[in-house]
Image (tube, grey):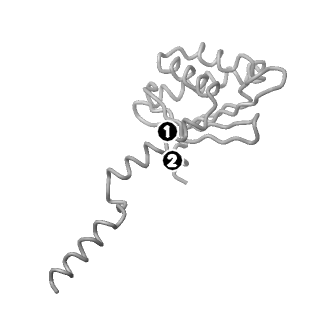
Amino acid sequence: MNKFSFLFVLLLLLNTPATAQDRGALQKDNVKAANALDVNIPDDIKNIVDNFFAEIIKKNYRPAVEKLLQTSPIAGKDDDYKNILKQLQRSIDMYGNIKKYEIINFKSAGNNYHRINILSLHQKYPTRWELTFYRSPDLGLIVSNLRFDDFSEEYFN
């Protein structure tokens, strides 16, 4: 009878799903989630984000912002445009250079309106970015809103 009990417990343990303590399972889930997120982002938006942050990482701040906003209504508003560059420089002065970035989430409202949230990884502290894209029937894909701040803790809520 002891052998039967032992075999029963062993079979039960082997068929039990991995728990949250299993780091391998968690890492696989995170990789799957990241890959699924990339699949959902339209290529043109992903390319714009990748190119923007590639220039930011190279410290080409003004050209990066100019290219990102070239067809945006924001570019025509000198005060908003200057404020973006000023705030970007201020965040870099406070937290260090941006070394890389991670896409946190992507949402769509229909086929033509999209929002992407990004975490930029500085030397001292991350910042959060929100870019809203509008696929205009006349102008194509434009950035209709750009926000960034150091409230990155909000991503945990």
**Where is residue 69 drawn, in percent x and y?**
69, 20
Residue 35: mark? 1
How far apart, in angstroms, are the residues tagged by discs 2 and 1? 23 Å
Nearer to me, 63 or 88 = 63
Mark 1 neighbour density, 10 Å: few (under 14) some (14–19) many (20 or more): few
In-front residue for pair 86/128? 128
Q: Is residue 10 above or below residue 70?
A: below
Query: Label for residue 153?
Result: 2
Q: Is residue 137 left or right of residue 104?
A: right
Q: Tags 2 and 1 in contact by the CB under 8 Å rule?
A: no
Disc 1 element: helix
Place of residue 93 in the rendered image (x, y in percent of width and height, measured from the top left): 48, 25
Residue 57 point in image, percent of width and height: 47, 21
Above or below for 3 versus 145: below
- State which quadrant residue 3 falls in: bottom left
User: Where the C terminus falls, by quadrant?
Assistant: bottom right
Image coords of residue 29 (percent x, y): 43, 49
